[in-house]
Amino acid sequence: MPEHVFRSRRTLAWGECDPAGIIYYPTYYRWMDQAAWDLLAACGYGARRMRDEGLTIPLVNAQCDFIASPVFGDVCEVRSWLQRHGRSSFTLAHEVWRIASADDGEVLARGSESRVWCRYEAGPGSPLRSEPLPADLVTALN
């Protein structure tokens, strides 16, 4: 795992489970999406700043390998890091862990998201144009 790993905790809620109390697979994708936005906020690009500056990060690819299933009430941790970046695109890697103790856990899923750094031409709903990733963001992610 790289040096800069961003961590966010989640407790599996009933609405994120199937009737048997096992995680419903789209929950992993929601958690990865939220982790991406949490990571940007930790780097100084929170949702308010992104909105105010007309920025967004559309998702262009996502994948997830399901390894094990948490159940209702399990505490999980999403670990995210920059896997690669180009001029305006970047890929975040994510691992979802069930947390058994401070020093122990089990990998539940591994996934990634590819996104593009964009600006709205005239506000939300207008066409998007890709822009180079900000240097300060790349530095914070590395």
Image: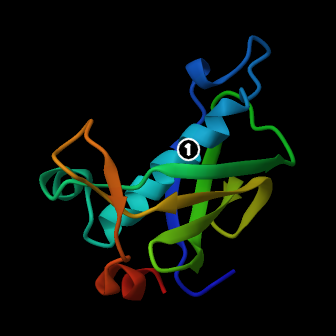
User: Which residue reaches farthest top?
Assistant: 19
Image point (60%, 34%), residue name: 12
Residue 67's place in the image compared with 112, above or below, is above
Q: Is residue 107 left or right of residue 8?
A: right
Residue 113 appears left or right of 104: left
- Residue 22 point in image, percent of width and height: 77, 26
Tell me the crowding category of disc 1: few under 14, some 14 to 19, or many 20 or more residues within 10 angstroms, Cα based: some
Q: Within the image, what quadrant is residue 57 found in?
A: bottom left
Colour scheme in use: rainbow
Q: Name above or below for residue 121 compared with residue 82.
A: above
**What residue is pinned by disc 1?**
31
Give coordinates of residue 80: x percent, y percent: 57, 65
Task: Work out which residue is located at the far left of the displayed protein and give it.
Answer: 52
Secondary structure of the residue carrying tag 1 is helix
Q: Residue furthest right?
A: 67
Residue lying at 52% horizontally and 82% vertically, measured from the top left: 4
Report the front residue among 110 and 10: 110
Kindly identify the residue that appears in the image at 34 percent across and 70 percent down.
Answer: 131
Q: Position of residue 119 (x, y in %)?
A: 27, 58
Above or below for 141 versus 65: below
Q: Quadrant of residue 31?
A: top right
Q: Amino acid at mark 1?
A: Trp
Horizontal side, residue 141 vs residue 42: left or right: right
Can you say whether 77 is above or below 140 in the image?
A: above
| Residue at the (69%, 80%) spot, across then down | 1
Depth order, front residue of 8/130: 130
